[in-house]
Amino acid sequence: MTTLIDAPPQEADGLLPTKKSRSGGGLGKYLVVRFFLIFPTIFILITLVFFLMRITGDPITAALGGRLPPDALQARIHAAGYDRPIWVQYFEYLGQIATGNFGRTISDNLKVTDMLATYGTATLELAINSLVVALIIGIPLGMVAAKYRDKWPDAVLRIFAILSYATPVFFAGLLLKLVFAVGLGWLPVAGRAKSGNEIALTSLANPTGIYWLDAIRSGNMGALGDVMAHAVLPAIALGLLTGGVFLRLVRTNVIGTLSKDYVEAGRSRGIREFRLVTKHAYKPALIPIITVMGLQIALLLGGAVLTETTFEWKGLGFQLAQYLTARDFVAVQGIVVLLAVIVALTNFIVDVIAALIDPRVRY
Amino acid sequence: MSRNEGSLFQRLPVVSHLGKSVGLQRGMLVTGLVITALFLLTAALAPLISPYGFAQHFDSQLPPSGTHPWGTTSGGYDVLSRVVWGTQTAVIVIVVAVILSIFLGVALGLVSGYIGGWLDRILVVIADAIYAFPTLLLAIVMSIAISHGRSSMLGGIFAAAISITVVFIPQYFRVIRAETIRLKAEPFVESAMVVGASSVRIMARHIYKNATRTLPLIFTLNASEAILTLAGLGFLGFGIEPSSAAEWGYDLNKALSDTTAGIWWTGVFPGAAIVLTVLGLTLVGESMNDLNDPRLRGRRRAGRKLPPAPGTPGSNTVHTPGTETAGNGVTV
């Protein structure tokens, strides 16, 4: 979760040519330097999680502690190499990652790359669904709030936005389940699809792992309806959280541009208010909106962990909680590396877009 | 704030904001203050208000009745008592977490911004990496590392607080560092250097006092985030044991499986407590933020509309490095 008023944490001053060499450098140099900043980010997170996980104990004790005599336990720990100095293990792990070898998970003996692909697509599907919900909620309502600034629609929408932030995803999920799944019986309580459909969809040739896409590709309309029904509540629960953030973001930035001279000029030339808001004020407000939206990826991923647990949506977040309980270092580190890469890449892309749109960023 | 004439009382953060506010904004600020006061009062008076202890066992899943106004949970706890005692846990965790992160974040930010050089660069890269990562995940890993998954009474509360601290340090670090870099170039700091004041003295006296003006605001906003993180930890099962302290997130986790049986009272009440508390704190923080920013401050209806001043960010708003480059003064 991110603080409400945090401005985009773009790179700090002093690190990039943005502030240092005002005289030149230009876009190319900016992008190259910005690109290479991806690596320390990933490296730091891997290191941090590696050492934190080692403090927690080893997976063999977590799985078998109490059930095996201490010397047998010790023998297993020794065989797995967990009693070696931590630095040796650390550099060995870095070496493995560098060659693309992420190992096999300890608790369920899957190849980490396969595990990431299987559960990652489930999380991706949830993220896409909720992003759609968030955009549908956030952009139009944000424009309405900006248009009626300080009047009652604005007050209602701002309270809605604050409420959507104040409601934890899992509580929103619980309420949605109580009302629409249990109370009214309209939608399924949990999961991604009925088990029959799930088997049908995962046993397809070359499945994408995104169920609705697979259902459309295989022409299985019954499964498509089922998948959609399962997707609605999780998407709304997570979408409300991000949608509230988008609403505030659009509101603040459209208010900023609405008071610019050129909008006043447009108004004096008789352009209708609707057009002023949706075209003239909204478009220039897009730059900060895109920047901050990109940075919501961390919020979305954090929210996904909670949403997936609430709805038993078997994605990365759901699995992460399981692996953490099992002290499965290998699996947790694999997931963290993937999330770190996603976050670092998104931030990079956001900065590139900002630099392309607004030349002030790169000088 | 410093421009305001008036007594010390009128210049206190919240009081001065109350004075500046009008209309809707004042309504939001007052509502927030009332809810926050209720929250603090409940926490302070928990032993008096709560009908039972938070770890006292009864029959499980009793519906709301005279003896248990909000029913009992699947674990046999009284829901009302758990919710009331939960405010105390929340307050302790917030206070410990925010104070720890202010101490460490402010100290690191001051040193990093003032000394600069390679130390500064390394700290910035680390802070940025942590800042960009999903905070809840870091908090989970931290809490496992600290408490090894099992938590005692105070141990659990501190583990949760420290996990949240790790997440917050980068935020304080960024704000204070940016302010320090700005202040370092101010004439009064230079003159202190010329007079021969030591670096520690300059940091502690001259820069610290000026760089920490925005802290009340971050405090309020982080307090609400701390509650959400604590609840998230508890919900995922990495928080405080139910017998050591009442914690809303844990109760919601247990309530999840009740929903299919149509049992609503175990989840709705602790959830509503989270929403209400976060709402109160956010309303206060939010209104203070808007009031600090002249462009967002509500305008009195009687007066002529003042032209906004684009490109001149209010000096009191929270700025993290990078906002300036975005040019539009993004406040989310």
Image: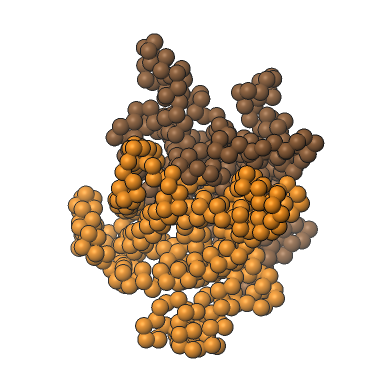
**In screen coordinates, is B223 left or right of A43?**
right
Color encoding of the figure: by chain
As drawn, the chain in brown is B
Q: Is residue B292 visible?
A: yes
- Residue shown at 75% from the left, 49% from the top: A151
- Residue shown at 45% from the left, 88% from the top: A218
Q: Is residue B150 visible?
A: no
- Residue shown at 28% from the left, 68% from the top: A104
Q: Of A270 and A171, which appears nearest the observer?
A: A270
The x and y percentages for residue B139 are 45, 50
Q: Is residue A349 above or below residue A213?
A: above
Q: Of B149 and B54, which appears nearest the observer?
A: B149
Residue sitting farthest toward the front:
A269
**In screen coordinates, is B231 left or right of A98?**
right
The x and y percentages for residue A127 are 49, 66
- What's the colour of chain A in the image? orange
Q: Of B109 and A352, which appears nearest the observer?
A: A352
Q: Is residue A152 above or below residue B325?
A: below
The x and y percentages for residue B329 are 54, 42
In which quadrant will I find the N terminus of chain B? top right
The x and y percentages for residue B154 are 50, 43
Q: Is residue B2 above or below residue A357?
A: above
Q: Is residue A261 above or below residue B112?
A: below
Quarter of image, res B178: top left
